[in-house]
Every structure is written in structure tokens, then in C-alpha cells.
């Protein structure tokens, strides 16, 4: 990243955790590398709401934390965030809200308006925005924002809600697992971006990503390897500079 001492970017194994990141988590990986965002955190860390909206956040998050430890509160909520409210007219067999019975490792945060629950189930993340009117033991309902993208929003939420069915958790995680090409794209993009932020040349980045032998054989002005490295760096810089919003 911007501080080359902050992370050793050479070993690809250091990036393997991105295999299991969803869109919002991957978006954070790009934002936290942004030098301007890192400076904003240093200036306003004691006033985390100040300037947060500029970056698409409700609160500033520490850029030193990678996606395994950070819980950025995005604004507006990504489609995959499940909105939970009290059921105003519950049926006799309505399910009751019992927070601690949700599966997975949980993280709770209050952003000033509602309780935000993030729970990790197998290799997936479920995010819930819980209304302050909802109490433990009350009947509850899921809400989807109205609008022209209603179908997209519901499909995203439906995919997340399958994680609450413990009989389907492992099957879902396997069925939706990333393919090799899908994995290599963000892994190599982040690694190339970190090398660039550390001041390494494109050729130096290529040696780390593809090996010295490949660079010796295939590195020339109009070669495919050089073009590939340029694309990786350009994509990383674009996502870091604001393109991460598309991942939400």
C-alpha cells in the first residue's frame, strides 16, 4: 500500500483471504489503499462521521484493518444488506427474533440510527440492519426498498437469507464459491496495486506476479505480458479511486 513498510506485497499467499470476500468486503480492500482516504482517517479519526459520506461510508473505518477485521458501514446500504423490522401484524406461527441464535461469528455495531449485525457463516458474510424498534422475542419481517431495481434487491437479499438455513449453509458456500479466474482477478489486481503504491516499476510488478523467467522471455513493448500488467494496475487504480462503489 502507500506505506511500503505496512505490508510485504511479494508473497501471493498474503492475499489468499480475498478468495472469500464478497462485493462490500472487496470494495473495502480498494478503498483502504487510497492515499487520500488514509490521510482523511489520520485527520478525522476522532470525528469518524466527518467526511465519511464522501467515501460512501456512514463512519470512517481504520484503513490498517483488512477485510477480515474491518466492518465498514457503507452508505447507502449495499443491496445484500438485509433490513429487519418488527412485524406489525404477525401471524400465529410467526418466527421470533432471537439475535444470538443466528449462526456464525457475529459483530455488532451501532451507527447512530440502528444496530448493524455482521455474521460470518462458513466463508460467507451476512449483514443485517436491525430497526431500533425491534426487540429480542418480537415477530419480525424483512424489508426491501421499493423502486425500479426491486428485483435485483430482492435477489441479493434472498441469496443472503439462505445462509440462515443451517441445513443449506455448506451447500451454498460450495455452490457459490469463486472460480479460479474470478479469484485470480482481484488477487493479482490488489497485489499489482500494492506494488505500484510501493513505488515498484511495472516490470518489477511483473517479476513478482509472473516470475523472472516469464518476464525475461515475454517482456517487450507490445507484448501480452506487459499489457496484462498494465491492465491489472489500471484496474486497481480505477477501483481504488472510486470504482469500488460498483462492487457494492
Image (tube, rainbow, N blue to C red):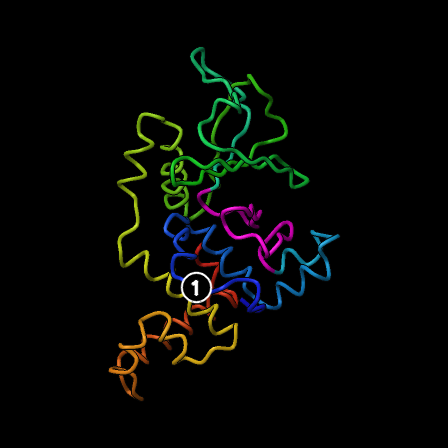
Up/down of 161 relative to 151, above or below: above
Q: Is residue 151 left or right of residue 56?
A: left
Mainly helix, strand or loop, the magenta region? loop
Instruction: Residue at 31%, 25% (x, y): give it.
Output: 167
Residue 211, x across and y down, in percent: 31, 72
Residue 96, x across and y down, in percent: 50, 17
State which quadrant residue 16 falls in. Answer: bottom left
Residue 142, x across and y down, in percent: 47, 31
Reading the image, the residue beneath label 1 is 190
| Camera-nearest residue between 175 and 76 | 175
Residue that protrudes farthest toward the top in the picture: 92
Q: Is residue 72 magenta?
A: yes
| Camera-nearest residue between 87 and 19 | 19
Q: Is residue 122 magenta?
A: no
State which quadrant residue 216 falls in. Answer: bottom left
Q: Please give the range of residues in magenta.
A: 55-80
Instruction: Residue at 63%, 49% (x, y): give it.
Output: 58
State which quadrant residue 51 falls in. Answer: bottom right
Instruction: Residue at 39%, 42% (x, y): give it.
Output: 156
Residue that protrudes farthest toward the bottom in the picture: 221
Residue 163, x across and y down, in percent: 38, 33
Kindly state the secondary structure of the residue where label 1 is placed. helix
Instruction: Residue at 59%, 57% (x, y): give it.
Output: 63
Up/down of 94 relative to 120, above or below: above
Up/down of 121 relative to 93, above or below: below
Amino acid at each position: 500500500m502507500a506505506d511500503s513498510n505496512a505490508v510485504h506485497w511479494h508473497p501471493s499467499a498474503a492475499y489468499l483471504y480475498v478468495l472469500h470476500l464478497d462485493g462490500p468486503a472487496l470494495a473495502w480492500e480498494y478503498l483502504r489503499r487510497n492515499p487520500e482516504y488514509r490521510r482523511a482517517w489520520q485527520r478525522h479519526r476522532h470525528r469518524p462521521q466527518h467526511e465519511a459520506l464522501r467515501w460512501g461510508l456512514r463512519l470512517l473505518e481504520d484503513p490498517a484493518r483488512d477485510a477480515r477485521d474491518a466492518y465498514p458501514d457503507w452508505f447507502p446500504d449495499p443491496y445484500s444488506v438485509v433490513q429487519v423490522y418488527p412485524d406489525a401484524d404477525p401471524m400465529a406461527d410467526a418466527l421470533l427474533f432471537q439475535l444470538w441464535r443466528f449462526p456464525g461469528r457475529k459483530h455488532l455495531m451501532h451507527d447512530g440510527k440502528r444496530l448493524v449485525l455482521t455474521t460470518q457463516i462458513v466463508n460467507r458474510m451476512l449483514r443485517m440492519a436491525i430497526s431500533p424498534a425491534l426487540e429480542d422475542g418480537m415477530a419480525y419481517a424483512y424489508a426491501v426498498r421499493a423502486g425500479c431495481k426491486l428485483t435485483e434487491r430482492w435477489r441479493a437479499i434472498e441469496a443472503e437469507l439462505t445462509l440462515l438455513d443451517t441445513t443449506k449453509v455448506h451447500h451454498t458456500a460450495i455452490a457459490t464459491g469463486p472460480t479460479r479466474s474470478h479469484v485470480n482477478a482481484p488477487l493479482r489486481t490488489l497485489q499489482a496495486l500494492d506494488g505500484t503504491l510501493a513505488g515498484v516499476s511495472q516490470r518489477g510488478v511483473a517479476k513478482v506476479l509472473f516470475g523472472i523467467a516469464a518476464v525475461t522471455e515475454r517482456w517487450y513493448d507490445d507484448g501480452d505480458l506487459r499489457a496484462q500488467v498494465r491492465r491489472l494496475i489500471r484496474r486497481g487504480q480505477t477501483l481504488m479511486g472510486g470504482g469500488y462503489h460498483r462492487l457494492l
